[in-house]
Amino acid sequence: QVQLVESGGGLVQPGGSLTLSCAASGSGFSFNAMGWYRQAPGKQRELVATITSGGSTVLAHSVKGRFTISRDNAKNTVYLQMNSLKPEDTAVYYCNADVHDALGYLNYWGQGTQVTVSS
């Protein structure tokens, strides 16, 4: 069984910064691409950023230049550094991971962490 545990969300003022962490665990699994999605009230869940095990990244246009995704493969942990936060970044942020074991490939979601950008 794979678990994704997110941390780091909270309330921040516009222009502020937050760092989200997602620690993945699961015996016998290898973690491939990992990433972050977000869902604001009344909106669909959207991609924020992803990173492969080799370090290749994809960022949504709306966060380029402000957010950075990174990972520590030894810890199976992915990070999202969020700078210059805007009210429109307010959402529940979900960690996502593509994993595989000897039986095949699966995709997992974390429970989500709330990020609120407000003065």
Image: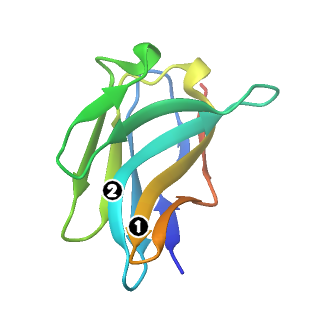
Instruction: Indicate the amino acid at tag 1.
Output: His
Instruction: Indicate the amino acid at tag 2.
Output: Asn
Residue 38 disc label: none
Residue named by callout 2? 32
Residue at the far front: name it. 103
Label 1 and label 2: CA atoms lie apart by: 8 Å
Nearer mark to the viewer, of 1 and 2:
1
**Quadrant of the rendered structure where residue 70 is?**
top left
* Helix, strand or loop at mark 1: strand
Answer left or right for 55 relative to 34: left
- Residue 21: % across, % down: 39, 56
Query: Closest to the observer: 15 or 41?
Result: 41
Answer left or right for 39 relative to 85: right
In the rendered image, the vertical position of residue 81 relative to residue 59, given as above or below: below
Residue named by callout 1? 100
Answer left or right for 13 relative to 84: right
| Number of numbered callouts drawn | 2
Answer left or right for 94 relative to 51: right
Q: Is residue 110 visible?
A: yes
- Callouts 1 and 2 close, C-beta under 8 Å: yes
In the rendered image, the vertical position of residue 97 relative to residue 62, given as above or below: below
Q: Earlier in the sequence, mark 1 or mark 2?
A: 2
Binning the other alpha carbons within 10 Å of mark 1 as few (below 14), some (14 to 19) or many (20 upward) gives some
Q: Residue at x 33, y 22 (%)?
A: 66
